[in-house]
């Protein structure tokens, strides 16, 4: 099904109306917002043909999953964005895919989002004070996409602080596994943000970029800075997690070393002594030492010397 | 043997015909597709000379193995591509090498592919609706090459997800070895994709690049984006595997540490006690303690104190 | 509350005066310094509206936490800087945020700093000899921000030298944990410095950058070099810490190996011997060897051979 | 001694003639090839002065060891290349240093190569069919230098494949050490290739580069691509070796962990039991338990419980 | 104290004369070399004011420690260089700081060097054959600075080769610690060289760079290449050391694994057997097995089976 979103000035709210037939008259009621999120493949084809969209662009627009990109052609521009649709960074299920195909008069959107709260925000929510134009709608959607990351990243910062404290005090396998999962999610998010950051960096720095015909420099810079900041944050969080993993390994190695030291010293001192005791615990009939008057005491002294000798050797070798 | 591929408008299928003699008249039947995949070295030389191909380009075209490149000279352009010819990423046997030498009228191809299914796709398969021109053929072959990676990469993504779950729960040497193999394959694939991505990035960004005379900007951008996406995917998968390797090492270190703790504590507590028991198990005739009325009980108490003392020391040292 | 800072030529000190009402006449008393550090959200809005500041810029200015940036628009320029407000690098609580919005006539500042000593420096402290202009104030504040890092970094260098000596001699968990904390702080600081370095690099290298209208090339170069040096220092310190972590792990591995060697040799030699002694310590009635005249001595010789054999095997295997 | 290389059109082979005196008439017999490989320091100085070579260039030319570089000055150009003179990558003794100082009429070469087979190739070997010019000689020498790497690198690829298989199955110290040696050699080779790649990249991309006056674009591109390919290959081989080292460490850690598990379980179960047996093996006169009728059996049952208890604890802790 | 260095044409040596008063007439005796190495802070201020040096530049010149930089302003250029003043790379005490402030007529130098041999070279040492101009002096000093690294780096290469051989055969903690120290020194040196390399790279590639007014392209290229080579060498040595550290860790892990294998096998085989022997060494009155005629032999057979069983298990598990 194809929907049309429109702002009803009387109710001062946004309404949506189902479209059963695509007529060229629709094009006259500018600005027009067509929502293909729930359209069938056929309906998509119809719209693409009616608006004479170039096949490469149409193909990208109708794909369920495409990395963020921007492409302009004749009247229409295609902007594909990806929002963060999970509650936090413990698991990455799927991005919210936001495909926008727009000219000055028409916006065709296709939003795929499994998180209801974000899905609502990606629907039209303009208040009366704001210009009711296609470009304003695109701007609001872009800001909603960048906003879908920020809150979660900021609250992840606290999570990370706590992780650091825990890991440095006493880490465990659970924490380790969750850190690995965070790293994996942040890597994927970082890649999505890199693409989006690059889109707006190009728009700012390239001469005569199509987007700079649509938005003011201030707006483009704002989009860029928002995605750049998100990208730089995921970069840093990822790196901090990596540092933690490395630091944890280093601490663990040190502890193994300490334990090894204790074990080796105790073993090296007592194992030979225990052997000696075992020798004089044998039941041979003819063991002359056993009947020596001081045999026991001499043995104890010998054991003492062996023990102290081992200790001295360890001290000499700087083991403690 | 040299083959000519041609589209038979009556049968509406592609046919191939063996060529026994190269005549200049062949050049007149434009567009012409010569297939040298099974040509002998001599036949290759003949074709190169007939078309007056520059020696450096001819040398690159006739090589069985050359990294992807593009070079233009006079009328002819050389495009060398590499497709992925294995079923998955467990082992990398050989790339599908696609050497294309083309002018506006003639396409000379040399395709080396050991995977039958891909080999078929790299043969002409144009349907009637499409322009029957040399550049269209080159475009279709390029898209087939990029397509030879995509499906396998997407299904590798699922494989990777499962690997992550397994490794974080309980990894083993088998998984580790297969991860190492994946990394090795992804590295090689990534290098091939980097070359191909760079070819089309140059074509898009350099002024007056020969390829931009052959293809529209939209097509070049499409080629570029396809290879860029593939490259970025292999990059990320490789990095995620590296993360897994590191995380696994970290987890393993932690487990060694835990085991070491148990071993050291048990050993440190019981080894000295066992020694003491060994001492009073010796068979010396003259061991006064043995005949003490409470000798045994005193020894047990001493043992208890030593044991508890060790435990207290471990507790004090924060071992658990 | 909004404050006005002004230089009293008679007292030759800086004074501050609370403003209760914002009138347009205020704009006439150039140069004017408005301090919004303690202003309420409403008062901020009022000032922004009175000076007709663009909404994107106003939003960035009024945020409590924004990465360093520079943006110019119409008359006003926004410069956001971050100083280092902690005593050293053991813990990173919060940056000193310095938001400056200035035209040639007016400076509006919003400084958030929890460290009293730095906070004082970020208040006006111009002496009579210096030009009393808005741009001079901005310059002094920028230098104060860069200065807030330098002393602490130089004294960290000594700290680092000592850390290196300690870790190479005998590291411990405490040192390791503090190194991890340093790394985490340096990473965050490095990111802040990277943003600030980039601001002034842009100002130096871009043609017609707004900042080059405000400051001389010499000043811009000085700002750039100061932040570049700080950035390069944190980079190097971070990397040196990483080297230490790696080197420590390597040393630790080596020590584990050495201990393992001792433990394995002692165990391998004595454990079989102790078993043999245990066998002849069994109390079976019928153990023929026990009554052999030389049973004991033969056993001792066998034990000697087993012991020497093990030693020879270790020697042969190059264990020491 | 200074040699002159010349092509004898009658014998159709290359000849060399010793020069005892440098006269200006020599310059007339263009093209002239002077070989200073075995010249004394004095003779070198003489040639430099006769041809009025600038001191900085003369200094670089006469050095036995200089990283690859290109520099043009007045009539003469200096090209320093480095070939690979060892049989394989197990050890890096010394590069083949190829110093070429050439104008359109004269080539002065100084080749230092300890590998006889390569040394022969670096001597003139032009066949009749090829232009007998200075630039052709330089081209052939450049191709010989790049060719000195390729065969060895391609055969190293197979070596690497085998190494991968071995390391993943069962690595040992020997393999590890040889991998370390390969890495060290590849790093040095990679640096030499980076310099040479950059020389020809500059020649291709800089406007009015002196080399583009000497060689066609096709030739320069060919030189560049050859060195770029070699560089990219050493890069990848080095990285693959690093991956192997990391993967091997990870596998080793896992095996240590497995062994630790077995050792700890066996020790933890039997060490306390052995202690208990030791206690009842003591020879105190007054040990009431010993005379209990069921003392032995009760002890065995207690031992069984302790053993099963330990096993249960390990099971509970998920140790196997 | 301020010194004037001058070349006495009669004695054909360099002399130095102390200056008590700075007069403007001094400026007339061009070329003039003022040495402020031992000047007081006041004297420095005097010179700066007399020559009207801009404050930012004066501040950088008079600092004891500033990273290498170049800055030009009006008549004067400031060049800060850092030479290597230690005997080798085992410890980095302090760089030789060479601050040069020069116009076409005057050179003001401030050299801080704790190594006497290098300090001598940094004093004027021109022979008669060379142009006695300010720019020639600056050139000689720059070459002395670059020369202060080269010899030490080349002799470090041999040191490194030996380190590699030692580490791969049998590393120890001493070597490890010294490698860590080398890495730390090389990192600091590398940073200094990066700054100096960049100074001359800018001078070569920027259009109308002030230094290209002072020196010929040949000289600038020579400076650049010298520092670039040094930088690239320290880069490679550092990386080779890192490779060694990693390789050593890998080798160590392998050895721990081998030792662990031996220890675990010996322990696993003998610990249960020793327990069994301990059981029959207990002194309970009622132990029926002890009086069995074949009890001892049956026990020995059981022990044999247990031992062989363990061995078989290890073999089955592929432990050796
Ligand atoms: Mg990951
Ligand atoms: Mg930003
Ligand atoms: Mg950034
Ligand atoms: Mg990244
Ligand atoms: Mg690391
Ligand atoms: Mg690999
Ligand atoms: Mg790569
Ligand atoms: Mg490449
Ligand atoms: Mg793409
Ligand atoms: Mg990318
Ligand atoms: Mg990447
Ligand atoms: Mg890593
Ligand atoms: Mg960190
Ligand atoms: Mg960062
Ligand atoms: Mg600087
Ligand atoms: Mg830096
Ligand atoms: Mg960084
Ligand atoms: Mg590393
Ligand atoms: Mg190396
Ligand atoms: Mg290098
Ligand atoms: Mg190439
Ligand atoms: Mg590569
Ligand atoms: Mg490299
Ligand atoms: Mg690594
Ligand atoms: Mg590592
Ligand atoms: Mg270091
Ligand atoms: Mg550095
Ligand atoms: Mg730098
Ligand atoms: Mg060089
Ligand atoms: Mg380089
Ligand atoms: Mg570096």
Image (tube, coloured by chain):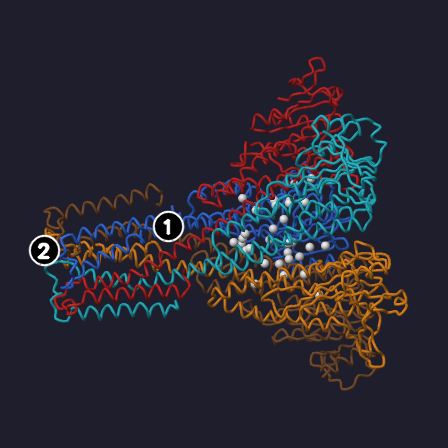
Chain colours: A orange, B cyan, C brown, D red, E blue
Which quadrant holds residue A290? bottom left
Asked whether residue E141 appears in the rendered view, the answer is: no
Q: Which residue is labeled 2 in the image?
A: A292
Report the quarter where the C terminus of chain C lies.
Answer: top left
Horizontal side, residue E94 vs residue A52: left or right? left
Q: Which of these two is toward me, B26 or B226?
A: B26
Horizontal side, residue C217 vs residue A276: left or right? right
Position in image of residue D99 (x %, y %): 65, 31
Q: Mark 2: few, some, or many residues within 10 Å (few <14, many ≥20)?
A: some
**Share a chain, discs 2 and 1?**
no
Horizontal side, residue D79 vs residue A310: left or right? right
Asked whether residue B241 appears in the rendered view, the answer is: yes
Position in image of residue B143 (x %, y %): 74, 47
Q: Which of these two is toward me, E117 or D30?
A: D30
Which quadrant holds residue A113? bottom right
Pointer 1 indicates a residue of which chain? E
Q: Residue at x 62, y 21 (%)?
A: D1
């Amino acid at each position: 099904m194809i929907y049309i979103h429109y702002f009803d000035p009387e109710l001062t709210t946004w309404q949506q109306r189902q479209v059963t037939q695509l007529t060229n008259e629709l094009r006259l009621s500018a600005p027009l917002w067509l929502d293909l999120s729930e359209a069938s493949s056929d309906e998509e084809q119809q719209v693409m043909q009616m608006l004479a969209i170039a096949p490469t662009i149409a193909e990208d627009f109708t794909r369920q999953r495409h990395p963020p990109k921007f492409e302009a052609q004749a009247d229409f521009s295609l902007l594909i964005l990806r929002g963060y649709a999970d509650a936090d960074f413990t698991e990455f299920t799927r991005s919210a895919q936001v495909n926008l195909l727009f000219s000055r008069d028409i916006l065709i959107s296709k939003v795929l989002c499994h998180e209801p709260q974000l899905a609502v925000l990606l629907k039209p929510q303009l208040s009366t004070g704001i210009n009711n134009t296609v470009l304003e709608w695109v701007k609001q959607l872009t800001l909603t996409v960048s906003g879908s990351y920020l809150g979660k990243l900021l609250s992840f910062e606290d999570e990370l602080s706590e992780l650091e404290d825990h890991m440095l005090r006493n880490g465990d396998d659970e924490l380790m596994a969750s850190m690995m999962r965070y790293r994996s999610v942040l890597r994927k998010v970082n890649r999505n943000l890199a693409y989006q950051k690059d889109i707006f960096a190009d728009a700012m720095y390239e001469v005569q970029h199509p987007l700079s015909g649509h938005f003011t420099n201030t707006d483009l810079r704002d989009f860029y800075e928002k995605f750049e900041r998100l990208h730089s944050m995921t970069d840093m969080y990822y790196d901090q997690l990596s540092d933690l993993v490395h630091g944890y390994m280093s601490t663990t190695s040190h502890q193994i070393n300490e334990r090894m030291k204790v074990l080796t010293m105790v073993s090296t001192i007592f194992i030979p002594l225990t052997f000696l005791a075992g020798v004089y615990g044998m039941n041979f009939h003819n063991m002359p030492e056993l009947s020596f008057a001081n045999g026991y005491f001499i043995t104890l002294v010998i054991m003492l010397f062996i023990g102290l000798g081992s200790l001295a050797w360890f001290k000499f070798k700087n083991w403690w």
